[in-house]
Image: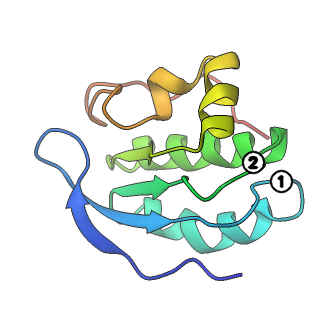
Amino acid sequence: MTVPPFSKNALSGNSIAAVIPINFELVRGAEAQIMRELLPRVKQESIALTLSGVERIDAAGIAALITLYCSSVEAGRDFSVVAPSPHVLELLQIVGLESILVGGNQQTSRERPCLECPAA
């Protein structure tokens, strides 16, 4: 599994983000690969993950999204989830992360604090 190259699109406000489609399950075991490939990128550029192709996500996948979000905030970059599948959106709503992670519902990196504790 490889994270595909990005295309440039608007994220929030005037920020430009690399839009990266994710089309695999964000579950225990798969999160290590996404972290390995995306953690360096969120520190260097704003990222928007398109999760419309994600049918399954578990606590490990949510923890990976939180870690990517916090790392981007610490680096002064933007990070968001765009077009989440209905299942992903439902779980993000249940755990209270929709307003933090889903694009269009969030503030820019300079306006939002990082979460208090690490995800994992």
Q: Nearer the viewer, residue 51 or 78?
A: 51
Q: Position of residue 65 (x, y in %)?
A: 62, 45
Q: Position of residue 27 (x, y in %)?
A: 83, 53
Q: Is residue 29 left or right of residue 7?
A: right
Name the residue that disc number 2 marks: 61
Q: Secondary structure at mark 2?
A: helix
The quadrant where residue 89 appears:
top right
Q: Position of residue 35 (x, y in %)?
A: 67, 63
Measure the alpha-carbon separation of dots 1 and 2. Answer: 5 Å
Q: Residue drawn 80% across and 41% down? A: 120
Q: Nearer the viewer, residue 89 or 118?
A: 89
Q: Nearer the viewer, residue 82 or 32?
A: 82
Name the residue that disc number 1 marks: 27
What's the residue type where badge 2 is placed?
A: Gly
Residues at badges 1 and 2 in contact (C-beta under 8 Å)? Answer: yes
Q: Is residue 107 left or right of residue 65?
A: left
Q: Position of residue 48 (x, y in %)?
A: 40, 54
Graded by Cα atoms within 10 Å as few (under 14), some (14 to 19) or many (20 or more), the crowding at tag 1 reads some
* Disc nearer the start of the sequence (1/2): 1
